[in-house]
Amino acid sequence: MLDGLPKGITFDGQVGDFLPTGVFVHVFRHPNEKPLLGFLPRFLFAPGFERIAMRGLRIQVQKKGFDPQKGLLLTMQT
């Protein structure tokens, strides 16, 4: 299902847990559906995001790719 989503599609997301390499983001496809979990690597953050990032922050992200082993890869860069 996630693999079939077009690259570059924009989602509303909510910052979850932090890792040294990036953040997990809960991605909302539809308001009534359970959110999907994606990963936003640090090198794909928008400029200045690391200064304001906190758990629960609402952000917009785009699908960068999908790896069956790692899941949904996200970006904030266009």
Image (cartoon, rainbow, N blue to C red):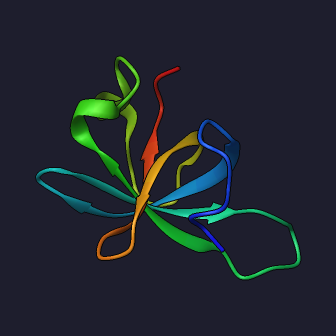
Tell me residue 10's x, y (percent).
Answer: 69, 40
Residue nearest the observer in this picture, 56 or 11: 11
The residue shown at (29%, 76%) is 69
Furthest residue toward left: 20
The residue shown at (61%, 36%) is 8
Tell me residue 44's x, y (percent).
Answer: 33, 32
The residue shown at (67%, 47%) is 6
Tell me residue 12's x, y (percent).
Answer: 69, 49
Residue nearest the observer in this picture, 31 or 55: 31
Q: Give the quadrant of residue 67.
A: bottom left
Residue 60, compared with residue 3, is above or below; it is: above
44 to the left or right of 1: left
77 to the left or right of 7: left
- The total of numbered circles placed on residues is 0
Residue nearest the observer in this picture, 47 or 2: 2
Residue 76, compared with residue 7, is above or below; it is: above
The residue shown at (34%, 20%) is 48
* Position of the N terminus by quadrant: bottom right
Residue 62, compared with residue 22, is above or below; it is: above
50 to the left or right of 76: left
Furthest residue toward front: 4
